[in-house]
């Protein structure tokens, strides 16, 4: 899941980026409110974390500008303002969730997962496909009820495919979701991850569509 | 006072109209009495004189002292006597009248329990008396006064009309009341001014109040938002970095996170220090009256920021023209003031900048060649927790509030302005007025 973080405070922004990366997200961090206005154009983000206390620019103005230009990505508002009026204003301006500083990293991750799940129209926290079930919160995959050891990127790739059932994802799309700006993508990285996933979870799990990309196999 | 305007106007009207009406009744009564009396008196006089002229014929027709009895009329009486006061003619009531030979004029007398007004007219031929019951006159006057009582019936009707008219007139006030009742407390739109001219000043005053309250409220809200941001951000940073230490396995990353935890703690401590300094300054209203060594103050302040300046390659120069703008004051506070100003100049200027501190009897001046402050932020500089457009530099937003407070205690006024050649220039000059407490 690729997340855009808009946060001016260096310690909070750095912590969010490092922490969410460790929790299985790919994160890009913008510190400047003016750059943030064009932020969602930069990559196909799944969600954004927006700090309202940006100096110079009001975070709500940034949000309103995103919504005006048609960006529908879920936005988790992160702010020090905790008055009920502020919360109402935040949610009414197009925010999807609201978290007051100081916050727990785990809660930020959980709320992001909930936002993404809701956007996919799914209520259950577990992603299921055939014999496989993935728990995004616990970062755990079960095959026929037995835990399977997956590397972090493999798990994220599987999560991406499970969240896009029935859709074909191109290699470029997968790379954009898996890697933030800080990480260089190796040319055959996606093929390697797919290969490992097939080896660990069965070759029928992921189908290759020549010239198009990858999609989930039939549920069996 | 909680009285209705309608009631007040109604009562006032009653209080003035009722005595006026009573007064009018009295005046009408007196006038009527006067006019009626005059009319009847004239009639009596005329009648008496006419009767007197008939006296010679009466006497000639008189046969042997026989009393001539006249037809009697109600409430009227006549009597005629000859020059020897011998009665010649009298009606039934007239017989009771006493003769007054030689007397001409009015007499009020009582007989048959009635007050009679009697006019005597005397001459050589004899005396004539024409009398009338006073009651007759009062009857006429009563009729005239009765017309005045009609007012008693008209008055309640008039009051009802006034009551209704007042209600109509006060309707705009009622609609304003409803507007105010339905208003949200933070609504800052002015009240409509299309009201009667009498209410307009009230509405104008209310609109001014609404504007003042709105600006105070906005200021408070901004302050709370800024304060929440400045107070919570260090804690949020601390918490998230501490969580990272728990979360990460890589020793190098953990180490970096621990460094950041420490930096967060330092930042929070700095904020607490500034808050406490400001709180102490708020309490302080007088200063120790000690002579100041401006050279020592300036040099120590520069020494305190020297490390930070060296790190950024920024040069600080001092120009000392005699002593500073005040001869006496608190040296440690002024040192804090200069340190905060120099610290800001170093912090917000690009590395390798020039910062100048000039101390002269006219002013203290700190200028840098950094980016300056955008014009829209200048008015709010010095407000607590206010920090203009984000830079990398961390700060609490309290440093300049502290500067402002110390300057105020020393009777100095702070001005921030952008230099035309770039950078910010802060000047502190003595107030023309004595320092505020």
Image (cartoon, helix red, strand yellow):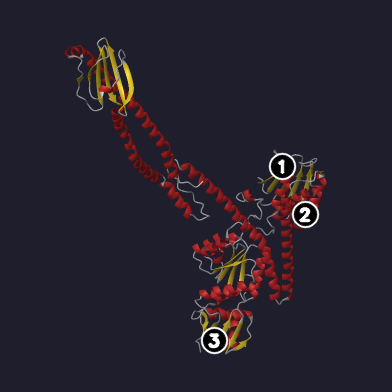
Corner quadrant of residue A75: bottom right
Corner quadrant of residue B414: top right
The reply to whether the C-beta atoms of the residues labelled 2 and 1 are less than 8 Å apart is no
Q: Chain of mark 2?
A: B
Q: Which residue is mark 2?
A: B305
Numbered mark located on residue B285 in the image: none
Q: The residue tagged with tag 3: helix, strand or loop?
A: loop
Q: The residue tagged with tag 1: helix, strand or loop?
A: loop
| Residue placed most toward the observer, A167 or B395 | B395
Frontmost of labels 2 and 1 is: 1
**Quarter of the N terminus of chain A within the rendering:** bottom right
Residue at 79% x, 51% y is B302
Residue B340 image offset from top left, x and y in percent = 74, 52
Mark-to-mark CA distance, 2 and 1: 29 Å
The reply, left or right, for residue B148 in relation to residue A197 is left
Corner quadrant of residue B156: top left
Q: Which residue is mark 3?
A: A205
Residue B250 image offset from top left, x and y in percent = 72, 76
Q: Which residue is mark 1?
A: B435
């Amino acid at each position: 899941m690729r997340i855009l973080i808009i946060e001016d405070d260096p310690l909070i922004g750095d912590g969010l980026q490092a922490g969410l990366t460790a929790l299985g997200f790919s994160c890009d961090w913008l510190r400047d409110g003016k750059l943030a206005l064009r932020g969602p154009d930069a990559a196909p983000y799944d969600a954004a974390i927006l700090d309202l206390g940006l100096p110079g620019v009001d975070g709500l103005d940034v949000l309103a500008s995103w919504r005006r230009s048609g960006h529908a990505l879920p936005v988790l508002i992160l702010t020090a303002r905790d008055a009920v009026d502020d919360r109402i204003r935040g949610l009414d301006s197009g925010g999807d969730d609201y978290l007051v500083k100081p916050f727990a990293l785990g809660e930020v991750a959980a709320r992001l997962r909930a936002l993404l799940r809701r956007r996919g129209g799914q209520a259950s926290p577990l992603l299921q496909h055939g014999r496989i079930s993935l728990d995004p919160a616990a970062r755990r995959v079960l095959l026929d009820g037995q835990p399977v050891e997956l590397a972090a990127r493999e798990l994220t790739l599987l999560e991406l495919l499970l969240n896009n059932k029935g859709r074909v994802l191109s290699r470029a799309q997968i790379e954009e979701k898996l890697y933030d700006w800080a990480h260089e993508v190796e040319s055959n990285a996606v093929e390697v991850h797919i290969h490992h996933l097939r080896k660990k979870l069965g070759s029928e799990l992921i189908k290759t569509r020549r010239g198009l990309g990858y999609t989930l196999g039939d549920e069996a | 006072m909680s009285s209705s305007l309608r009631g007040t106007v109604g009562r006032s009207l009653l209080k003035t109209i009722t005595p006026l009406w009573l007064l009018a009744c009295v005046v009408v009564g007196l006038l009527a009495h006067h006019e009626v009396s005059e009319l009847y008196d004239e009639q009596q006089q005329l009648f008496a004189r006419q009767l007197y002229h008939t006296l010679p014929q009466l006497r000639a027709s008189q046969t042997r002292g026989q009393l001539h009895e006249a037809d009697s009329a109600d409430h009227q009486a006549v009597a005629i006597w000859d020059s020897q006061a011998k009665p010649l003619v009298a009606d039934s009531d007239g017989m009771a009248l006493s003769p007054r030979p030689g007397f001409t004029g009015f007499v009020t007398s009582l007989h048959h329990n009635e007050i009679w007004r009697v006019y005597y007219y005397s001459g050589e031929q004899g005396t004539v008396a024409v009398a009338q019951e006073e009651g007759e006159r009062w009857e006429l006057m009563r009729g005239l006064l009765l017309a005045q009582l009609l007012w008693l019936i008209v008055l309640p009707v008039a009051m009802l009309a006034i009551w209704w008219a007042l209600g109509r007139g006060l309707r705009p006030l009622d609609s304003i009341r409803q507007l105010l009742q339905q208003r949200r407390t933070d609504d800052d739109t002015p009240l409509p001014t299309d009201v009667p001219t009498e209410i307009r000043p009230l509405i104008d005053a209310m609109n001014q109040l609404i504007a003042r309250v709105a600006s105070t409220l906005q200021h408070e809200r901004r302050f709370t938002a800024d304060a929440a941001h400045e107070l919570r951000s260090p804690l949020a940073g601390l918490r998230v970095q501490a969580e990272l230490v728990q979360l990460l396995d890589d020793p190098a990353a953990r180490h970096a996170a621990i460094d950041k935890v420490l930096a967060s703690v330092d930042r929070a401590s700095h904020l607490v220090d500034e808050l406490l300094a400001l709180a102490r300054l708020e309490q302080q209203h007088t200063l120790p009256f000690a002579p100041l060594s401006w050279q020592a103050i300036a040099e120590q302040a520069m020494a305190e920021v020297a490390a930070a300046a060296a790190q950024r390659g920024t040069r600080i120069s001092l120009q000392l023209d005699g002593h500073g703008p005040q001869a006496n004051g608190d040296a440690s506070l002024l040192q804090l003031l200069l340190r905060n100003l120099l610290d800001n100049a170093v912090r917000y200027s690009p590395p390798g900048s020039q910062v100048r501190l000039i101390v002269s009897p006219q002013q203290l001046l700190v200028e840098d060649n950094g980016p300056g402050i955008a014009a829209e932020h200048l008015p709010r500089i010095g407000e607590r927790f206010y920090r203009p457009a984000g830079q990398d530099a961390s700060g609490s937003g309290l440093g300049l509030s502290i500067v402002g407070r110390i300057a105020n205690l020393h009777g100095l006024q702070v001005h921030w302005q952008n230099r035309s050649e770039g950078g910010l220039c802060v000047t502190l000059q003595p107030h023309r007025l004595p320092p505020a407490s």
